[in-house]
Amino acid sequence: MSDLFDKLPQRRAIIDRRKLGEQLAAIAAETNDTGQRRRAMVALLKEALGAGHSEIAHRLLEAPSHGRLAAQATAFLIDQIVRLSHDFTVDHLYPSGNRSAGERITVIAVGGYGRGEMAPHSDVDIGFLTPFKQTSWTEQVIEAQLYTLWDLGLKVGHSSRSLEEMIRAAKEDLTVRTALLEGRFVWGDRDLYDQAAARFDAEVVAGNARAFVADKLAERDERHKKMGDSRYVVEPNVKEGKGGLRDLHTLFWIGKFIHRVRTVPELVDAGLLTARELRQFARAENFLLAVRCHLHTLAGRAEDRLTFDFQREIAARMQFAERPGKSAVERFMQLYFLHAKSVGDLTGTFLAHLDDQLAARGRRFLPSIRRRPGKLNGFVLDRGRLALPSDDFFEADPVRLIEIFALADKYGLEIHPQAMRQARHDAKLIETQGVRRDARANALFLDVLTSPRDPETVLRWMNEAGIFGRFVPDFGRVVAQMQFDMYHHYTVDEHTIRAIGLLADIEQNRLKGDHPLSTAIMQQIHSRRVIYMAVLLHDIAKGRGGDHSILGAELALRVCPRLGLTAAETETVSWLVRYHLLMSATAFKRDLADFKTILDFAQVVQSPERLRLLLVLTVVDIRAVGPGVWNSWKRQLLTELYDAAEEVLRLGHKQRGREQRIANKKEDAQALLGMGDKDFAKLAKRLPESYWIAEPVEVIAANLVHIQKAGSAPLHIAAVPDDDRGATLVMVLAADHPGLFYRIAGGIHLAGGNIIDARIHTTRDGLALDNFLVQDPLGRPFDEADQIARLTRAIEDALANRQKLLPKLEARALPRARAEAFRVAPNVFVDNKASNRFTVIEVNAQDRPALLNQLAHALFQSKVTVHSAHVATYGERAVDTFYVTDLLGGKIDSAARVKSLEKRLLDAAGADEEVEVA
């Protein structure tokens, strides 16, 4: 009998099999009717199953971190239900007094159930095994038991095989082979189970270790790729994700297949884990199982993705508390990622042990790139990997803890997992032996950081070994720290390392197609060390309870000199960290056609070198946020801002290039259209100077075609997909009147469009020319004819007032479930200094469908004219900026009027009594 549940306390409080057995015997004695017996059995077991789940849920709340006990308790509960139902089926539903040798059944638990690890809504994976082909009696028993389990509400994964069929399926199918590897006897004929186990060992396992290991590692790599290939995605999959439970299972499966161990502790005797690594394995598994059990309980179903809406609730259930600068949910997720990192560490050392056991002498079992370096400074090569000559090698000279990574980078070598394990163990020497103050250590670290080869990979190794955070303690504080929002996809340390990798890619011309300007600029930057250090430090002060840009700038003044930067370099790094969000905020939230925007930006930047550095830092920061965050629209806005600011810094504040820029744009637009001088001049004179500055050449050309086609029509709407910007350009030429902007916005939203930018122009002959960049709900352009027709029709209906906009929009605006985990308190900023001509209004609010329309309607009610609107979204947060005047074209500077405007916009943004007005 299995000793799997021997340490499970008070098992009878979960389910009392003896008592239930007596009650089932009483049911059988009451009636001979098979149907009545079965219904009564199901009712009794259903009640017992519910009571057992309630007891386990109560225990999990009482001891919320004891995941292994909760998972084992669930498996124990299912075991007793299966046993009771099997006995009742065999003895009272389909009794057979004279069974043949072939009428034997064994019930086997496989998969997670076989391991004794079940979350509340895990599948019950069972196998029914018979000695030979099934008889009519075994078919009846198996079918009856399955119906019982289904009637109990269990999700059953099942197979029914003869002994021969089982062996054949295991040989042919890796999934079956893996499931049976964890097979555990539950009930039935024990001799048949023992026979099956012996044949499985002899015919499936023996001699096939190498093939199984290769298959499982390939399967793991494919799974990681599917799940995002990072341990540090902020909504991880607890079971299948990198660093999740399945990675631990894979190690156990491999060890079990090779050495036929029954439990994880036996992997120590097999030489695949040390005692310390076993404790690491147990801690990580216990925590991940706890998270998975809480997740299933809260979801009420089998759910393994730890989404934002569950993270906060699980943090509360697991009794995490707030700390200064760090919320309870961020502390919970930081521990989650530390455990995921621990799983990655275990995997590396486990595979190294495996390599040693399976490889032929002097060769590698697992594939690798072999490189031959020159001097190794005492380190040795072990089958192409950088290794240690002895276990006390780091202790003899702790600077080697940094040097091993510098050598790996210099020669393109992998580091032996045993050396990584020793580095993790000896990382504390960095603190106790003064390594941070050692000039050689700091120079080696700077070499790795600014490497022209692959700094991302080596810095990630340093991070996983725990060396990075020890050597740069401020970086250590953000290791595994998540950012609880829908914008950031990775933890702070992973985001930073990815950004450094992107910087190296840009410098090495590997991203020239995506980032042509940044690639060109990297060749002009005077100090590579400054830009790499700025990328390293830009988010280093997150989670400290203040503005991370200001706090980070102060940290840079302390960290940079220690790492060997000059006073001038340190000052520049500090400035870059302080203003690393300035360029994106200006480009995405302000009107770049307003010259005051450019002047204000240039006044902060002050030098062309700082501008170059800031652009590159901004690009890699945005790109490293996560997939899909960078797009061509952002590239264009940043390029426009860079070009305009570069001109101001080069020529001064006289804007001497304005007339030339307008002339160039007219020339380029005419060439693009292939239009004659006379026809072009006729169209061009209808547009004011401000229009030519505001719009790019491609939009100008589209607008001129639009105006030409409109002729004398009172309304003309056109939509042109723009793949470069990843959006559709919607152009509306109409008689100008109050409310035009909010009605167009409403029509676009009703057609399913999201507005990402809007510019409102007035032609010299008094018509409104409004340009909107619009995307579909998935962030793509509207490019099909029926989509564009629907968009055009919706705008026409809105302008003709054919339908009540607000009720329709409210009916359409379904909330996003994930966004409900967040609360963004609306804020309104009214700024009369940001522009010489306009009042600039910035609204921060929870993103939702038709938000822009509701804000535009509030502006209409406030009797202001919108001249341009700029929409930026950062996950769940929307930032909408409007350049407005009063109806006479003046700024809104009356205090009473500003207060009234703020209140209307806050109401439209969904404010409650707790929000602030800034």
Image (tube, helix red, strand yellow):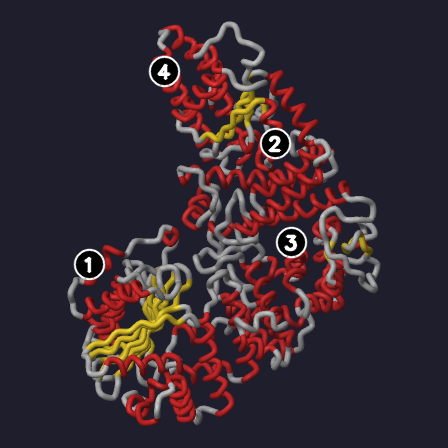
Disc 2 packing (10 Å; few <14; some 14–19; many ≥20): many
Q: CA distance from mark 3 to mark 1?
A: 53 Å
- Could you classify mark 3 by the number of other residues whose Cα lies within 10 Å: few (under 14), some (14-19), or many (20 or more)? many
Q: Is residue 633 visible?
A: no
Name the residue tied to disc 4: 40
The answer to whether residue 198 is left or right of residue 41 is right
3D distance between C-alphas at marks 2 and 3: 37 Å
Q: Quadrant of residue 147?
A: top left
Against 80, residue 681 (above or below) is below
Q: Closer to the camera, 867 or 385?
A: 385
The x, y position of residue 466, in whole percent, is 66, 54
**Which amino acid, mark 4?**
Ala
Locate the N terminus and report the quarter of the image it occupies. Answer: top right
SS of the residue under disc 1 = helix
Marks 2,3: beta carbons within 8 A: no
The residue wearing badge 2 is 170
Residue for badge 1: 807
Report whether 683 appears left or right of 11. left
| Residue occupying image coordinates x 22% and y 83% | 711
**Mark number for residue 464?**
3
Element under disc 3 = helix
Front position in the image: 526 or 221: 221
Which quadrant of the view contains residue 575? bottom right
**Crowd tier of the residue under label 1, counting other residues whose Cα lies within 10 Å: few below 14, some 14–19, many 20 or above:** few
